[in-house]
Image (cartoon, rainbow, N blue to C red):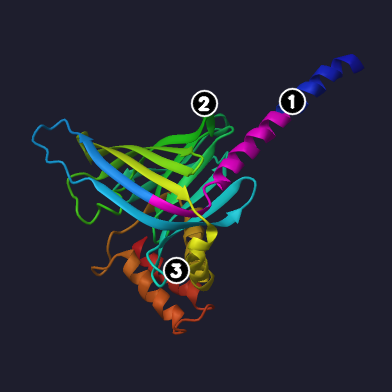
Amino acid sequence: MTKNYIPIAIATILFTTATYAQDATGKKNVDKLCGCFSVNYKYAETFSPDIKYKYHDREDMNAMELVLPLENTDKKVVLQHLLLINDTMIIKHWREEWLYESPVLYEYAGSKEWNKKQLPATAVKKAWTQTVWEVNDEPRYQGISQWMENDGKIFWESTADAPLPRREYTTRSDYNILKRRNRIMLTAEGYVHEQDNDKILRTDKGDKLIVLEKGYNTYYRVEDKECETGKKWWKKNGAFWTVVRDQWQQYLSATDKITVKSKVDDKILGDYFTALWKDWSNNKVSTTELPGKVKEVLTKFL
């Protein structure tokens, strides 16, 4: 009997070790997305099935970006992006959340509506879900994949429908779905967020491809001292956005469907939060009052 138990015990140990190694490797890769970066953003439309389509201008932009870990555990990492325009102008940018083997996935249906989907354990085994949140912490898209290594390259990739990107949602109305094929690849200098996107017009009759787009967001790691102004800004203002994030989470925990209004009284969500942030910064709204005020704003839009 003892002899029979030995191979079973060894197999159990090997399986546990392999699972832990996958956990640890993926976590180590996500941690490499934190830090101070000089970023180059490039986008170019590449092909349209409509020969009369007029291609939009290519975009090529540079910025300094600080990526701060707000939460960091073995199976959850929350990263806040800050744009550093200059020493006095810091912009809260997008946020990403990484969860290991998460069974929940919100799928974008269009018209600023997301539907909650429960995934089987087999679909999320050893996989990391990346959730991307808007500047005002409203949802954008989620993707799920294992971190992979092939031919010396370490990468994570997924496909997800999403709303129009910020760079276009105020200027475009010819499409309403961005099907994002995202690949995050680690490099010696930092990492690359590579995108192969479909700009789609979705109607009751189905999906119509408007144009394909290629994107390269290249993150070059620089010394942390280059982002000190961002760290100081977050130390001063992070409490406000922590409350916003918590109020969003309370709402998400209680619903299987998210619908966000584009405007209320001709103002977008960001207008309301900017005004509230200014009042809080000027002590017109106390930290005790803040959760209730944030909830009031969200209630207008949800």
**Marks 2 and 1, the one that precedes in the sequence:** 1
Q: Residue at x 31, y 52 (%)?
A: 61
Relative to residue 17, is residue 81 depicted above or below? below
Q: Position of residue 69 (x, y in %)?
A: 56, 56
Instruction: Work out how far the residue at label 2 is from the one at label 1, CA to CA, in angstroms.
Output: 23 Å
Residue shown at 72% from the left, 31% from the top: 17
Nearer the observer, 99 or 115: 99
Which three-letter amino acid code belongs to the residue tagged 3? Lys
Secondary element at tag 1: helix
Q: Residue 275, located in which quarter of the rendered image?
A: bottom left
Q: Secondary structure at mark 3?
A: helix
| Magenta part of the chain | 16-39
Eyeballing the image, is 25 above or below 165? above
**Crowding at mark 1 (Cα within 10 Å: few <14, some 14-19, many 20+):** few
Report the residue marked by disc 1: 14
* Lateral position of residue 209 relative to residue 29, left or right: left
In the image, what residue type sits under mark 1? Answer: Leu
Circle 3 or circle 2, nearest the eye: 2
Nearer to me, 188 or 23: 188
Give residue 184's quadrant in the image. top left
Q: In the image, what residue type sits under mark 2?
A: Asn
**As drawn, 153 above or below 163:** above
Q: Which residue is mark 2?
A: 150
- The residue under the point 51% across, 26% down is 150
Rendering coords of residue 199 (x, y %): 25, 40
Whether the magenta-drawn stretch holds residue 21 is answered as: yes
User: Mark 3 and 2 residues: CB-CB less than 8 Å, in contact?
Assistant: no
Task: Tell whether 261 sits left or right of 220.
Answer: left
Q: Residue furthest right?
A: 2
Q: Which residue is mark 3?
A: 295
What x and y, as percent, mark residue 70? 56, 58
In this rendering, position of residue 44 left or right of residue 216: left
